[in-house]
Image: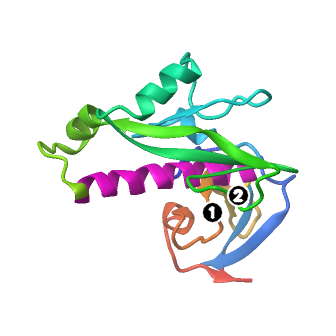
Amino acid sequence: MNTTRQRKNCWVVSEVVGKFHHNGKTMEICRDNWASDPRGEHNLGIMICFHKRHALGDSHSLSIEDAKELENSADVIALPVYLYDHSGLSVQTTPFSCTWDSGRLGFIYATKENVRNEFGWKNLTTERQNKIREYLRNEVDTYNSYLCGDMYAYTITDASGTVTDAAGGFCGSDWDTNGLFECSGTKQWSEV
């Protein structure tokens, strides 16, 4: 998922990581240092995290005991969330190999009622529950990209150097799959 925001040429201070041409226009891709926290957008899952130094995941007022009860409830589909905290933060739904700088952070869940309403499903088969787990995994992956600074933005300029388009909030560095090229209006860009 990506969020796009129209902006004036505010990425000029960021390092250019990709440069492309198409029909007399130039696209420069930079890290998006101003990307919005993806947990503030529409998400299927709710990420419950507990950390002494960092406010991570979604805002909540649950105690650890209440959170454990919720995670184990038959009314939710949940996955654990782990944190690696060393010279930066990284999250995923499986444990990290370094147990010194990592551990369980919390969990991400979707209520079965919300899943039924969102998808119009009456029955939650095993296959459908696995599909929801994959959605939740993707939400954690997107949040990880945000935490790691793996978010990108572009500016498009015409031959005179005037900015004609700009957008940001693209997750991951595969321009073909993260929606960046698609949002720019064409996938026909040639790398410089």
Tell me residue 184's x, y (percent). 54, 63
Quadrant in the picture for residue 126: bottom left
Q: On the picture, is 9 further left or further right than 135? A: right
Over which residues does the magenta segment extend? 127-148
Quarter holding the C terminus?
bottom right
Q: Nearer the viewer, residue 88 or 70?
A: 70
The image's mark for residue 150 is: 2
Q: Which residue is at a point 49% across and 20% down the rendered structure image?
A: 66
Task: Tell whether label 1 touches label 2 (CB within 8 Å).
Answer: yes
For mark 2, give the secondary structure: loop
Quadrant in the picture for residue 35: top right
The image's mark for residue 172 is: 1
Quadrant in the picture for residue 30: bottom right
* Main secondary structure along the magenta-highlighted residues: helix
32 w.r.t. 18: above or below: above
Q: Which residue is at a point 67% across and 78% down the rendered structure image?
A: 21
Q: On the picture, is 33 further left or further right than 4? A: right
Residue positioned most to the left: 122
8 w.r.t. 128: above or below: above
Mark 2 or 1 closer to N-term? 2
Tell me residue 118's x, y (percent). 25, 39
Tell me residue 139's x, y (percent). 50, 49
In the rendered structure, does residue 150 fall within the stretch colored magenta? no
User: Taking the image as drawn, is residue 8 in sight?
Assistant: no
Q: Amino acid at mark 1?
A: Gly
Q: CA distance from mark 2 to mark 1?
A: 5 Å
